[in-house]
Amino acid sequence: MRKAPANIWDCVYPVVEGLGYEHVGSEYLRRHDGNLLRVYIDRPEGIGVEDCATVSRQLGAVLEVEEPIVDAYTLEVSSPGTDRPIFKVSDYQRFVGQQIRLRLQVPSAEGRKKFKGLLVEVTDETLLIEVDGLDYQLALDDVDEARLVPRFG
């Protein structure tokens, strides 16, 4: 996933966790209309607008002092939503048995970059996804973006 660099994570993680939220993950996007630091937060009872505002205020102050980002950027704090992004090995492990969709940075040996299927198994370095009855073992380092497929009903 477009995971934020380590120096940004090192600033974000302790602030989010210190406020009592789960730091789902952060991504830093360089875009033509301006750079964006997107921080996903969660907690068991869910996330509301005030939660995002609280984290945004505190995090904004810390980022201003620590300056892990030198270019201008916009800070966005949000809930992970129903199509929750997956950043960490522990989250992949947590969601084994669920449907995910993912995009690789480079095509797999079979020439595919996009997959949607059942997350079957996860190690520290690979994941196994079943798509239409076929198993694909993929390197976690090759994943550009992964998300849960929402279940309704």
Image (tube, grey):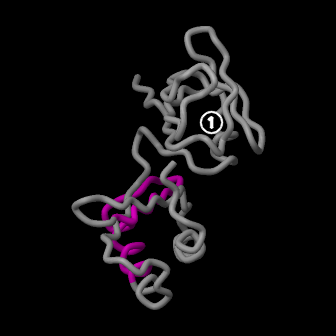
- Percent across and percent down for residue 108 are 60, 28
- Number of numbered markers: 1
Q: Amino acid at mark 1?
A: Phe
Residue at position x 41%, y 57% from top? 47
- Percent across and percent down for residue 14 are 59, 75
Magenta span: 36-60
Quadrant location of residue 7?
Answer: bottom right
120 drawn magenta: no
- Percent across and percent down for residue 9 are 56, 69
Left of 88 or right of it: where is 41?
A: left
Quadrant location of residue 6?
Answer: bottom right
Is 54 situated above or below 120?
below
Residue at position x 61%, y 41% from top? 142
Left of 9 or right of it: where is 78?
A: left
Is 145 situated above or below 119?
below
Label 1 sits on residue: 95
- Of the 4 image quadrants, the one containing the C terminus is top left
